[in-house]
């Protein structure tokens, strides 16, 4: 008879699965950061309200006579609440019947993959919903001109704000991009499930996405994009008997797996508070391609 508190092989398998889940989640977000060129994620307290900003400056006449007072130019930043960043709770369950019928690989591993992808997609969907509300709206006759105009508009905006806008990321509809590219010899790379082109038409990155409406080109400086997160490894949760596996220094997600004998299912729980955000809403260009494109 095994001694009490012995670590069993099943326990090791569960822990390995938990570590694998959070590690893969962290790796894919690291890949996204590399694609977008954004800085390290910024930790926020649960419930912190994120604000989208608008920056304006009214320059006074610089022709000032000798000995005269130099008038101040009025600079202001206004904020609009975007929403609070909070820990969100997700769960999935796999029955013993599903494992018996389909095998562990399909019932557990494949559903873990789907769970992870949906969690990531949820964050990206909200980000896309946000950037389409960018306030630098305009039109252009062609797809190429729309990209050029979007880049120029956001660079000009950041220059007026005295911010670094040298690198710009652009989002376009996938079909629009391939229609324009045609037989052009360009390398489309894939990372984090994103298709993108580097150094294309003046953009540091052009990301191809079916989430972007056809006929729309969206752009913003890389330095306008931030990734905020709430650390799910709160020690107070352990006092409730809730312990989530996290991934090292930057804990973007917590994950726990275990069996529920009452229902004979294997349960998986994810805890995360993750927001991909463009800080200045008036530094996002949304250019509509005209019918002549």
Image (cartoon, rainbow, N blue to C red):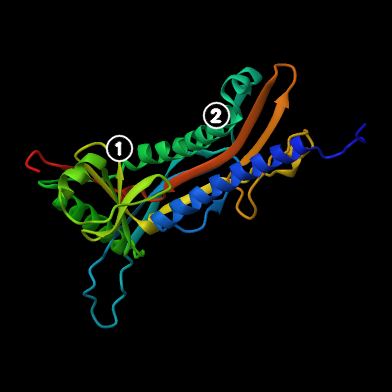
Quadrant, the C terminus: top left
Mark 1 nearby-residue class (10 Å; few <14, some 14–19, many ≥20): few
Q: Is residue 290 visible?
A: yes
Write down the quadrant of residue 184 in the picture.
bottom left
Residue pointed to by mark 1: 210
Q: Is residue 90 visible?
A: no
Q: Residue at x 30, y 37 (%)?
A: 210
User: In the displayed image of the protein, which residue is found farthest to the left?
Assistant: 292
Few, some or many residues within 10 Å of mark 2 (<14, 14–19, 20+): few
Q: Identify the mark nearer the N-term, 1 or 2.
A: 2
Q: Which residue is mark 2?
A: 106
Residue 146 location (% of width, % of height): 17, 49
Instruction: Identify the image quadrant of the N terminus.
Output: top right
Left or right: 274 in relation to 74 = right
Question: Dot 2 lies on which element?
Answer: helix
Residue drawn at (50%, 33%) of the image: 114
- Residue 240, above or below 50: above
Q: Nearer the viewer, residue 167 or 20?
A: 20
Q: Which mark is residue 257?
A: none
Q: How many marks?
A: 2
- Which of the two marks, 1 or 2, is nearer to us in this view? 2
Residue pictured at 71% horizontal, 30% vertical: 258
Q: Position of residue 144 (x, y in %)?
A: 15, 52
Q: Nearer the viewer, residue 231 or 75?
A: 231
Kindly check if marks 1 and 2 are in contact, taking CB atoms under 8 A apart as contact: no
Residue 128: % across, % down: 36, 40
Label 1 to label 2: alpha-carbon separation: 28 Å
- Horizontally, residue 31 falls left or right of residue 141, namely right
Q: Nearer the viewer, residue 281 or 103?
A: 103
Image point (66%, 26%), residue name: 266
Q: Secondary structure at mark 1?
A: loop
């Amino acid at each position: 008879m095994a001694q009490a508190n012995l670590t069993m092989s099943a326990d090791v398998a569960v822990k390995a699965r938990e570590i694998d889940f959070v590690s893969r989640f962290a790796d894919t977000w690291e890949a996204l950061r590399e694609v977008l060129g954004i800085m390290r994620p910024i930790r926020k307290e649960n419930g912190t309200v994120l604000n989208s900003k608008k920056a304006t400056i009214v320059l006074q006449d610089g022709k000032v006579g000798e000995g005269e007072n130099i008038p101040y130019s009025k600079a202001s930043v206004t904020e609009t609440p975007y929403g609070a960043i909070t820990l969100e709770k997700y769960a999935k369950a796999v029955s013993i019947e599903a494992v018996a019928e389909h095998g562990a690989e399909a019932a557990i591993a494949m559903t873990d993959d789907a769970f992870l992808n949906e969690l990531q997609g949820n964050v990206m969907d909200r980000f896309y919903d946000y950037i389409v509300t960018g306030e630098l709206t305009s039109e252009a006759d062609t797809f190429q001109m729309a990209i050029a105009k979007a880049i120029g508009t956001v660079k000009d905006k950041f220059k007026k704000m005295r911010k670094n806008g040298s690198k710009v990321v652009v989002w376009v509809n996938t079909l629009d991009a391939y229609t324009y590219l045609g037989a052009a010899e360009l390398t489309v790379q894939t990372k984090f499930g994103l298709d993108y082109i580097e150094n294309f038409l003046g953009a540091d990155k052009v990301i191809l996405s079916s989430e972007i409406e056809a006929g729309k080109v969206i752009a913003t400086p890389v330095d306008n994009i931030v990734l905020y997160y709430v650390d799910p490894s709160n020690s107070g949760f352990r006092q409730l008997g809730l312990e989530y596996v996290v991934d090292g220094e930057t804990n973007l997600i917590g994950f726990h797996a275990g069996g529920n004998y009452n229902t004979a299912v294997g349960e998986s729980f994810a805890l995360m508070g993750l927001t991909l955000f463009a800080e200045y809403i008036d530094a996002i260009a949304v250019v509509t391609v005209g019918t002549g494109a």
